Amino acid sequence: MYLRRFIWGTVIVIALAALCVMLVVWRVESQTESHIYTDVKAVPTAPVAIVFGALVNPNGTLSPILKDRVDGAIALYKAGTVKKILMTGDNSTATYNEVGAMKTYAVAQGVVDADITLDYAGFSTYDSCYRAKNIFGVSQAVLVTQEYHAPRALYDCRSLGINASAYGVADFSKYPDLRVKYTVREWLADVESMFEVHAHVLPKFLGPKETIQ
C-alpha cells in the first residue's frame, strides 16, 4: 500500500514538473517566434549583431557550431544589415578564449577589426544579454545563433530591454545527431532563463561601461 502511494506520488510529481517545463518552453517560443529569421535578406537592419560563443577547439579553431554562428554574423555584416558585431563568450582562463578566436576568424574573412567588440565575460546566454544592454549600451540588435537557441536568446534580450530579432543559422538539419540532446538541454535552460529574468539576477561579472561606437 505505502509503496503504491509512493510510486503514484512520484509519478504525479514528475508529471507536474514536466508540465511546468513545457509551459515555460511554450511561453518562451510563443513570445519570440515572430522575431526569428532564417534568410539573411529578410533580417531587419540593426546597429549591431550579437554573436554568442560556443566551443573553441584546443588548437584555437572554431567548432562547427561556433563557425556557423560567426559565418552568420559575417553574412549580415557584408549584406549591410548590421554595422558592428559584438562577440560574447567565455574567456574564463588564460588558455581558453572563445571571443578571441571568433574575432581572428572574422577578420580573416574581411570584417574590419574596428567593427568588432569583444565581451570576454559572456559565460551564459543571460549574462551575454544582460551585459550587452548594461555594459555595452546595446538597445537594438540582431542575435546570431542556431535556430534551437534563438528563442531563449531572444527571450533574455527582449526581457532585458533590447529590441532584438534573431538570425537563426542551421541546426538540426545540419547536425541531426544533436537534436535530442540539445532540445532537452534547451528546455531546461528555458526554465533557468525565466528565473534569471524575473528574479533580476546579476551576471557573474559586470565591470565598466564600454559603449559600442
Image (spheres, helix red, strand yellow):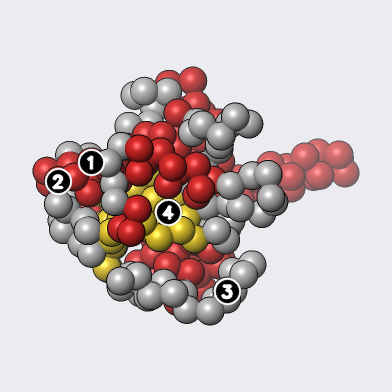
CA distance separating discs 3 and 1: 30 Å
Location of residue 26 with respect to 208 vertically, above or below: above
How far apart are the alpha carbons under marks 3 and 2? 32 Å
Is residue 160 visible from the viewing direction of this image?
no
Q: At x 46% / y 58%, what residue is drawn?
A: 118
Where is residue 141 drawn, in percent x and y? 28, 62
Amino acid type of the residue tagged 3 in the rendering: Leu
Residue beneath the point at 50% across and 49% down: 99
Front-lying residue, 65 or 22: 65
Residue bearing mark 2: 79
In the picture, the quarter occupied by the N terminus is top right
Q: Which residue is mark 4?
A: 87
- The residue that appears at 88% across and 44% down in the rendered structure is 2
Q: Give the residue pinned by disc 3.
A: 206
Within 10 Å of disc 2 (Cα), the crowding (few <14, some 14-19, many 20+) is: few
Quadrant that contains the C terminus? bottom left
The answer to whether mark 2 and mark 1 are in CB contact below 8 A is yes
**10 left or right, relative to 34:** right
**Badge 1 is on which residue?**
75
